[in-house]
Amino acid sequence: MMSGAGGPGAAVGSSGFAKRLLVTGGAGFIASHVVVSLVENYPNYLIINLDKLDYCASLKNLETISERQNYKFIQGDICEPHFIKLLFETEKIDIVLHFAAQTHVDLSFLRTLEFTYVNVYGTHILVTAAYEASVEKFIYVSTDEVYGGSIDEEFDEASPKRPTNPYASSKAAAECFVQSYWERYQFPVVITRSSNVYGPHQYPEKVIPKFISLLHQNRKCCIHGSGLQRRNFLYATDVVEAFLTVLKKGKPGEIYNIGTNFEMSIVQLAKELIHLIKKTNSESEMEHWMDYVKDRPTNDLRYPMNSEKMHNLGWRPKVPWKEGIKKTIEWYRDNFRNWKNAEKALEPFPVTELFAQLDVP
Ligand SMILES: NC(=O)c1ccc[n+]([C@@H]2O[C@H](COP(=O)([O-])OP(=O)(O)OC[C@H]3O[C@@H](n4cnc5c(N)ncnc54)[C@H](O)[C@@H]3O)[C@@H](O)[C@H]2O)c1
């Protein structure tokens, strides 16, 4: 399925655009913000969005730009080698921003092989095709989770990868494939590792939109384990700025942490959202809106990360938490139904029962 400028392989007159960018996973959360920003701010670039339209994707995330001449949507799977090879041949891609992935950590414990298949095999197919097509830059979007957890050791880009869950392991393994194209062929790859991102467009299986949506429906926030795990949260538009910075200034073969010092525990997060949505400061009322459930098998305590390298490229997060979370809450009030299956995302996650059955400690 294709929409926007041109049809299959129509190559919108390769002379018509200064650059042709392929963004994978553009109907998902982060990449949809990146696609919208690129389409709006780079009218001389053709932005091609390749997405399988998995359960967490929504084309509504792209409604504002779907008819623009410098935008093209292609429905397809990064795990199809022939299709991907043909895509590079017909679309004459100059730059790749690779976001497409299976991303839900909880689900990765249940569907481990699917995560390996999409995140590792799919990335391998994509980077190979990009290399064969002599793409000028290949940006692979990875995560701070590849470092594994830490209480106070701050990770920089040279820190070892010690992933502790199947999602993070698949992202770390994919990084190795991507990096090897730089080591072996000097193929210009760049890897980013970012903290948790929040904002509009995120499927409500993830903690912030899940808590917001549960509270909007007068249901309790379900907290895994003690809820003392701390997470760093970056607002979506700050992350878009980070990717635009890496696109322009990121050096081939380099890795960039995209982080923030702003962090809070999951319990603090729940309390903050209860305060903002239920308009209360009372501890007992807050407790009423929280439900503690059995934790997943591993849940890293913190991911403290040093983002000096990104700061040196001129990027810093700008959006204060208070402003970002207010916009996010408002967006979910009006747009929760953007996904047909949004309600399903709020169901109690089966990990609890599954691991109870397996007797995993
Ligand atoms: N969300 C975060 O906080 C965060 C933090 C750090 C890194 N990341 C990374 O950023 C990227 C995007 O994350 P997100 O949270 O926006 O993801 P998401 O789950 O919202 O979106 C993923 C998108 O990829 C698409 N997709 C999945 N499998 C595909 C396939 N085989 N072929 C084509 N498309 C496919 C889906 O349809 C979906 O639109 C991921 O690589 C993730 O690992 C995310």
Image: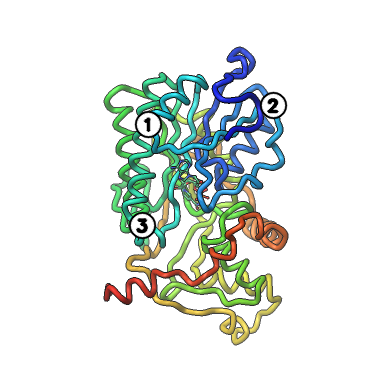
Please state the horizontal and vertical placement of residue 99, each as a whole percent of the image.
48, 41
Position of residue 117 relative to residue 329, above or below, is above
The residue to which callout 2 is attached is 69
Answer whether residue 316 is visible to the viewer in this image.
Answer: no
Which mark is nearer the camera, 1 or 2? Answer: 1
Please state the horizontal and vertical placement of residue 96, each as a whole percent of the image.
48, 30
Please, what is the three-letter code of the amino acid marked with disc 2?
Gln
Q: CA distance from mark 2 to mark 3?
A: 38 Å
Q: Nearer the viewer, residue 259 or 27?
A: 27
The residue to which callout 3 is attached is 111
Give the residue at x 69% y 61%: 326
Please, what is the three-letter code of the amino acid marked with disc 3?
Arg
Which quarter shows the C terminus?
A: bottom left
Give the structural element (helix, strand or loop) at label 3: loop
Q: Residues within 10 Å of mark 2 (few under 14, many from 20)?
A: some
Please, what is the three-letter code of the amino acid marked with disc 1?
Pro
The part of the image, by quadrant, that contains residue 285 is: bottom right
User: Is residue 268 toward the left or the right of residue 3 in the image?
Assistant: left
Residue 81, label in figure: 1
Which quarter shows the N terminus?
A: top right
